[in-house]
Image: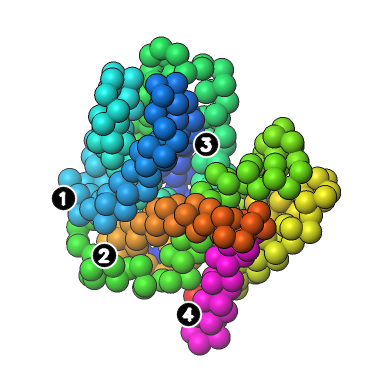
């Protein structure tokens, strides 16, 4: 068994940078490819005359693939090893990514979506497990903050590449595949440092969803608000009177908040005896910001300032939630819990756009804010209840 897994969380105080750099750089390369691929695929389908409904249905395969792949990942890694499973996932995601260019029939894009997002989900689950296993308990928040920041930069670089490469020809697909394949280099170099899963998880996969609910529900809310908010905010902003460029800038401000605040939030979580308190505070900030949105629509600058902090708080649910998960579990249980964590995120990305879109249709434009507030209110109640009725747990 590897050194990373054998030692109890509390015994290690040093950051094992060799492992962390491998896992973080690997998943960041995949983030670049996904950030490039999502707008690229949508634009190509639109050029082919595919309806928006069918494009949305094809895009939804990402969430479905993640929900299917997450519970299988730990079993596969237990049998073949963490590093080997990640290397195969890199190869499958790269090949399926290029496959979109050669798939001339629309129906072919459905199995390709499932393979691509299933493989990238495997990479996310095992990378986060590797990072959590390698991080010392007293500096886990810092490590997760670095991970979240680098990943956010990777996702931000994807659309920049798309704007530079365009959607014509094989080049954008080749660049995305090369970015994914580059992830294999650090994984292979650090393969002997990867955590070993010698034992199977002690409980059924679904039990891990409820084992650390403060973490899993946090990432569900994050997924719902992120996916629903990013996809529908431009519609909300333009209906509120902002121009398309102003709406795009507001989304950029939210992205900056995401990148800037993750390391400080991670450091803050390391100073706290109970990370659940910070998660409760972040959810209250998220609830307050969403409730204020309808009253900020006449002042772009004020809305930008609120969204800067709001974006950081929303993303903080992921970073601090992942740190909280790592502080509670180790070994095979941590790997299974990481899979449950990503599963809940995938459920949120499917539920969020549906709920927020329906709220807009039913109650009008402000339904955008009220639906998001509803997700945060759900988490505020849960997190405060956990603090009150389980005060000794960390």
Q: As drawn, is 55 to the left or to the right of 268?
A: left
Q: As drawn, is 289 to the left or to the right of 167?
A: right
Distance from disc 4 to disc 2, alpha carbons, whole Å, reads 22 Å
Residue named by callout 1: 79
Q: Assign a secondary structure to mark 1.
A: helix
Q: As drawn, is 261 to the left or to the right of 165?
A: right
Residue nearest the viewer, comparing 61 with 211: 61
Q: Residues within 10 Å of mark 2 (few under 14, many from 20)?
A: some
Residue named by callout 3: 155
Quarter occupied by the N terminus: bottom left
Read off the magenta span. 369-390
Residue drawn at (30%, 60%), measured in percent from left and top? 336
Residue drawn at (32%, 49%), measured in percent from left and top? 64
Q: Position of residue 365 (x, y in %)?
A: 66, 54
Q: Main secondary structure of the magenta part?
A: helix
Distance from disc 2 to disc 3, alpha carbons, whole Å, reads 29 Å
Q: Position of residue 93 (x, y in %)?
A: 31, 33
Q: Position of residue 140 (x, y in %)?
A: 51, 58
The circle on residue 87 is none
Residue named by callout 2: 205
Q: Assign a secondary structure to mark 2.
A: helix
């Amino acid at each position: 068994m590897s050194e990373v897994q054998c030692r109890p969380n509390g015994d290690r105080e040093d950051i094992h940078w060799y492992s962390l750099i491998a896992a973080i750089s690997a998943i960041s390369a995949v983030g670049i490819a996904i950030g490039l691929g999502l707008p690229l695929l949508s634009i190509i389908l639109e050029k082919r005359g595919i309806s928006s409904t069918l494009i949305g249905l094809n895009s939804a395969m990402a969430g479905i693939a993640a929900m299917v792949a997450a519970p299988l990942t730990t079993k596969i890694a237990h049998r073949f090893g963490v590093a080997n499973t990640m290397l195969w996932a890199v190869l499958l995601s790269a090949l399926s990514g290029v496959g979109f260019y050669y798939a001339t029939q629309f129906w072919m894009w459905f199995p390709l979506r499932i393979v691509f997002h299933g493989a990238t989900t495997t990479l996310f689950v095992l990378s986060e497990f590797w990072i959590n296993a390698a991080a010392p308990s007293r500096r886990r928040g810092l490590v997760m903050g670095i991970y979240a920041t680098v990943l956010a930069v990777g996702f931000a670089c994807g659309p920049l590449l798309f704007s530079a490469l365009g959607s014509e020809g094989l080049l954008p697909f080749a660049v995305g595949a090369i970015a994914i394949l580059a992830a294999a280099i650090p994984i292979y170099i650090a393969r002997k440092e990867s955590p070993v899963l010698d034992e199977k998880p002690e409980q059924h996969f679904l039990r891990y969803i409820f084992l650390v609910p403060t973490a899993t529900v946090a990432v569900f809310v994050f997924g719902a608000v992120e996916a629903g908010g990013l996809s529908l905010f431009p519609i909300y902003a333009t209906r509120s009177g902002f121009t398309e460029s102003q709406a795009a800038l507001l989304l950029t401000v939210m992205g900056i908040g995401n990148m800037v605040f993750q390391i400080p939030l991670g450091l803050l979580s390391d100073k706290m005896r109970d990370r659940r308190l910070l998660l409760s505070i972040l959810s209250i900030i998220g609830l307050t910001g969403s409730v204020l949105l309808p009253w900020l629509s006449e002042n772009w600058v004020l809305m930008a300032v609120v969204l800067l902090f709001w974006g950081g708080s929303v993303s903080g649910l992921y970073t601090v939630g992942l740190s909280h998960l790592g502080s509670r579990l180790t070994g095979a249980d941590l790997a299974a819990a990481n899979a449950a964590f990503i599963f809940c995120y995938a459920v949120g990305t499917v539920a969020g756009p549906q709920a927020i879109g329906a709220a807009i249709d039913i109650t009008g434009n402000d339904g955008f804010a009220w639906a998001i507030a509803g997700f945060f209110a759900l988490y505020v109640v849960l997190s405060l209840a956990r603090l009150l009725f389980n005060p000794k747990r960390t």
